[in-house]
Amino acid sequence: MSTYETTPIEPDVLMSRITRFREVDAQIVQQVRRVIVGQDEVIEQVRIGLYVGGHCLITGLPGTAKTLLVRTMSDILGMLFKRIQFTPDLMPTDITGTDIIEEDPTTGHRTWTFVQGPIFANVLLADEINRTPPKTQSALLEAMQEKSCTVRGNHYKLPAPFFVLATQNPIELEGTYPLPEAQLDRFLFNILLDYLTAEQELQVVDLTTTTHAAKVDSVTNCEELLSFQQLVRMTPISETVAKHAIELVRATRYKDPNAPDVVKKYVNYGGSVRAAQNLVLAAKARALMKGRYHVSFEDVRELYVPILRHRILLNFHAESDRVSQDDVLRQVLQVKPAPRE
């Protein structure tokens, strides 16, 4: 099962685009390393999100460089960056923008004028997204899926490309509002930032406690990134690999006849169709980043947990047995091994 463009591309042109893709990807990693220490898996997942046009939810403890990572990536990509600090009193119009009445000083004529909110950006940092009520969180639903927003009945397209990189703190429950499932499903990844090793923390201290100020250079632009997204979609995937990806997603639904016992015991709701779409798209991007021209079972299985961990809803048995989403998903991978190549 492969995907082709309607307009054929010459092989030498296609190879040059792939070569450029890998050059830019290597440069992005090189530039990020000037500022961010460690977190290789996190950086890879954020890059995949950019190459497929997906949004990322970054979950980590305070001081793990969540905000710094997002700001650094926007500087490297040469795109318009805006930040929203989510608070309990934030309103939907504070995100999307609003219409105001302006009066012409010469004629006295009044007209409605739309003032764009911070959502009109290429990279939107939704900082501590779980600190605002669901009414305000829902202002991002249309933007994340349809890359547009509606204000007072008027429809506005957002700049392309458009990414939401949201952060949340997993330990503070006071004054937080859990994200609704409909919004969680719109995130490609739920990326977990953990503590660094002792050696990496020493590097951080060396980098940040002197007069040295790390700076990054822009290595690409919006137009080129859009062409990379098109290139990722052109990456072929065999029918057996695609079927394996769908099988893994369907295995998280307890009503599915092939669902493993761990899912039937602990899962209330499994992954959606969007989860299967995102798993295949992300696997295509990873294959290109790893220097391959086709998707392998390894690509699908490596990205399975971060793509599904925020899409499955566990029941009270899981809570009482202290079983997490990652525990369930890893057991699914054990029960559903990859077919032989």
Image (cartoon, grey):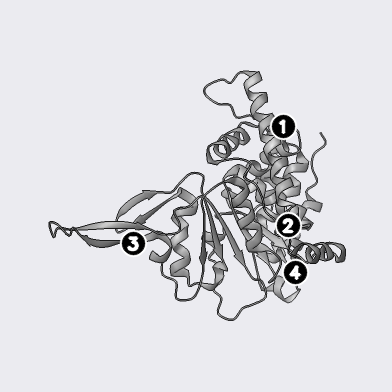
The residue depicted at 70 percent of the width and 70 percent of the height is 63
Q: Residue furthest left?
A: 107
Give the residue type that dot 2 points to: Ile
Amino acid, disc 1: His
| For the residues bearing labels 1 and 4, Cβ distance under 8 angstroms | no
Classed neighbour count for the residue bearing mark 4: other residues with Cα under 10 Å, few (<14), some (14–19), many (≥20): some
Answer left or right for 56 relative to 100. right
Q: Secondary structure at mark 2?
A: loop
**Residue under the point 63% across and 63% down:** 67
Residue occupied by mark 4: 323
Mark 2 closeness class: few <14, some 14–19, many ≥20 residues within 10 Å: many
**Alpha carbon distance from label 4 to label 3:** 44 Å
**Which mark lies nearer to you, 2 or 4?**
2
Earlier in the chain: of badge 4 and badge 3, it is: 3
Q: Are marks 2 and 4 in contact (CB under 8 Å)?
A: no
Q: Can you identify the residue that label 1 sits on?
A: 294
Please state the horizontal and vertical placement of residue 197, each as a whole percent of the image.
84, 64
Q: CA distance from mark 2 to mark 1?
A: 30 Å
As drawn, 98 above or below 235: below
Distance of mark 1 from mark 4, alpha carbons? Answer: 35 Å
Judge from the rendering whether residue 99 lies leftward or rightward of residue 126; answer left or right: left
The earlier-in-sequence mark between 1 and 4 is: 1
The kind of secondary structure element at disc 3 is strand
Amino acid on which the number 4 mark rests in the picture: Val
Residue 36, which numbered label?
2
Q: Toward which corner of the image does residue 56 lie, by quadrant?
A: bottom right
Q: Residues within 10 Å of mark 3 (few under 14, many from 20)?
A: some
